[in-house]
Amino acid sequence: MSTSEQPTEDELRAAYEAEMKRLRVEQVLLESVVSLVNLGMRRTGLAPGTEDEREPAQVHLAIESVRALTPLLEQILPEQAGPIRDAVSRLQLAFVQIGGAAPADAGSSPDASPGPSAPGGQAAGPPQAPEPPKPGEPGPAQKSGRLWIPGQ
C-alpha cells in the first residue's frame, strides 16, 4: 500500500482545521443564500429538464429564508445586497409564475377564487400570459403584494 496516494486521517484533520481557520461566517452566509436562491429556482421547475422537480412549498421556503437573511447580508456585505435582492425578486416572480402563493396569502387575495378549486381552475392553462406593465407601473407580482421590495 502506498501512503503517498491517500492522505492520512491526521493530514485530513489538519487540512480541515486549516480551512476552518480561513473560513469566515460571511462567506458561509453568502454561499448559503446563493444556494437557497439556486435551489429555489430549480424547484420552480421552469428550467428545461427540471419540470418534474416543481415544489412551490420549497420555493416559498427558499424565498422566506433568503428574505430573513437579507438584512444581515446588507449589514455585513453591502456590495452583495443588490444582487441578492435582484435574485430573490426573480425567484419571487418565478414563484408567482408557477401559481405559488404564500399559505397566509392564498385565501386572502382579493382576486383569488374561493374554495379549494382555485389553484386547479386558473393554473391549468398556459395561455394566460399577463400583459407587460407599462413603464413606471408596478408589475403583476407587485400588484399582488407577493413581491418583496426593499423599503416597502
Image (tube, rainbow, N blue to C red):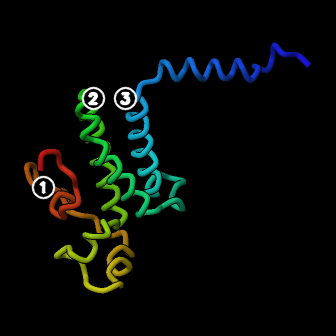
Farthest left residue in view: 136
Q: Position of residue 121 (x, y in %)?
A: 34, 81
In-image side of 145 versus 67 (left or right): left
| Residue at figure coordinates x 48%, y 18% from the top left | 22
Pointer 1 and pointer 3: residues touching (CB < 8 Å)?
Answer: no
| Residue at figure coordinates x 30%, y 54% from the top left | 92
Residue nearer the viewer, 10 or 125:
10
Q: Give the mark, 3 or 2, whose residue is nearer the N terminus.
A: 3
Q: Position of residue 143 (x, y in %)?
A: 15, 62
Q: Give the mark, 2 or 1, whose residue is nearer the N terminus.
A: 2
The residue wearing badge 3 is 26
Residue nearer the viewer, 25 or 35:
25
Pointer 3 and pointer 2: residues touching (CB < 8 Å)?
Answer: yes
Farthest top residue in view: 4
3D distance between C-alphas at marks 1 and 3: 33 Å
The residue wearing badge 2 is 76
In-image side of 109 versus 55 (left or right): left
Query: Which amino acid, by three-letter code, is at mark 1?
Result: Pro
3D distance between C-alphas at marks 2 and 1: 30 Å
